[in-house]
Image (spheres, helix red, strand yellow):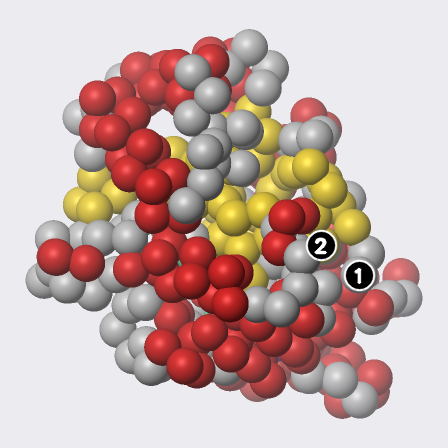
Amino acid sequence: MNARTIGNQSVSAIGLGGMPMSIEGRPDEARSVATIHAALDAGITLIDTADAYHLHADEVGHNEELIARALRSWGGDASSVLVATKGGHLRPGDGSWTQDGRPEHLKKAARESALRLGVEAIGLYQFHRPDPAVPYAESIGALVELLDEGVIVQAGISNASVAQIDEANDVLGGRLASVQNQFSPAFRSSLAELEHCASLGVAFLPWSPLGGIRRAGEVGSAHAAFGRVAEARGVSPQQVTLAWELALAPVVVPIPGASRPASVEDSARAVDLVLTAEELAELSGS
Ligand SMILES: NC(=O)c1ccc[n+]([C@@H]2O[C@H](COP(=O)([O-])OP(=O)(O)OC[C@H]3O[C@@H](n4cnc5c(N)ncnc54)[C@H](OP(=O)(O)O)[C@@H]3O)[C@@H](O)[C@H]2O)c1
């Protein structure tokens, strides 16, 4: 599969988002493992997760443990797979999401994620969301310590503004590897951050790239241009969406979520869909 880079690591141009396999509406373990194996069989070498991808308060790290088990039971060579996790968001178990960006929390959370993933060092650790109660530079300072102590190999951020991208990269001494922000046909307001990442050579990972778990199926009807191009090409609107995102900049690595093998197999084919300049103009202008 076509490759892109996150920091110094080469990854497949499309990743797999793990969230649908661990939160509300999640499938049983066998279907989740089959989905992860289908992604790996399709050549996907990036899996995005977070310690907060779980349902109940007592199962923090549900998704990290699921991914670790699936990697162990896969027949192929998993050594080149980058599992990117996150810390700083919490799910108390009532469906809400809270934040904790204190350095002491992030340093503890990263060590616990490494244990669950069964790795000596986490390939990419992302600060999940700025915590308004903690100065941003202090949260990022925890990533610096984790890098320097070898707990994590690369550091990324998520849900960040252009100013926060610059601040994080500054605190990290130019070592910011990735930015993960919401971006899809329905949510384009992160285009400024995407373009800023392109100018810095920092990977940009669109989250909910198809519009989110509940709306991904409607991307072709909610956004008519995507439906039109899909029909003309004989592919799914989801593939067109991912191919459009890939074409926006060489730093873009979409991470569509999936809870079924067929979804991730279809999404993986987006790397081979080369859209024309006319199609891209129509999609971007729609
Ligand atoms: N950093 C953050 O704050 C943040 C926030 C949200 C999400 N994320 C990350 O971003 C990832 C992606 O976001 P998301 O899962 O919320 O939304 P999404 O990727 O926009 O949509 C996910 C849904 O799309 C469906 N789908 C995937 N590929 C498809 C295809 N080719 N054709 C038809 N349907 C397809 C899947 O359906 P099935 O379930 O039926 O397979 C899945 O439930 C998450 O999994 C998570 O890793 C990060």
Q: Secondary structure at mark 1?
A: loop
167 lies above or below 109: above
Q: Residue at x 69, y 37 (%)?
A: 9
Residue where numbered disc 2 is placed: 12
Q: If the image is split into quadrants, where does the C terminus sit?
A: bottom right
How many labels, in total? 2
> Disc 1 beta carbon < 8 A from ligand 1?
no
Asked whether the viewer can see residue 261, the reply is yes
Residue 151 spot, x, y in % from top left:
42, 26
Q: Amino acid at mark 2?
A: Ser
What mark, if any, has residue 234 been given in the picture? none
The crowding category of the residue bearing disc 1, from other C-alpha atoms within 10 Å (few below 14, some 14 to 19, many at least 20), is some
Q: Position of residue 266 (x, y in %)?
A: 67, 79
Distance Cα–Cα, label 2 vs label 1: 6 Å
Q: Residue 18: which quarter of the image?
A: bottom left
Residues 237 and 177: in front is 177
Residue drawn at 64 percent across, 48 percent down:
79
In the depicted structure, whether residue 212 falls above or below residue 196: below
In front: 273, or 77?
77
Name the residue tied to disc 1: 1
Would you say 116 lies left or right of 226 here?
Answer: left
Q: Is residue 4 left or right of residue 162?
A: right
CB within 8 Å, label 2 to label 1: yes
Quick check: 253 left or right of 128? Answer: right
At label 1, the amino acid type is Met
Instruction: Work out which quarter of the rendered image holds the N terminus and state it.
Output: bottom right
> x%, y% of residue 28?
33, 81
Residue drawn 45% across the image and 40% down it: 119
Percent position (x, y) of residue 54? 25, 61
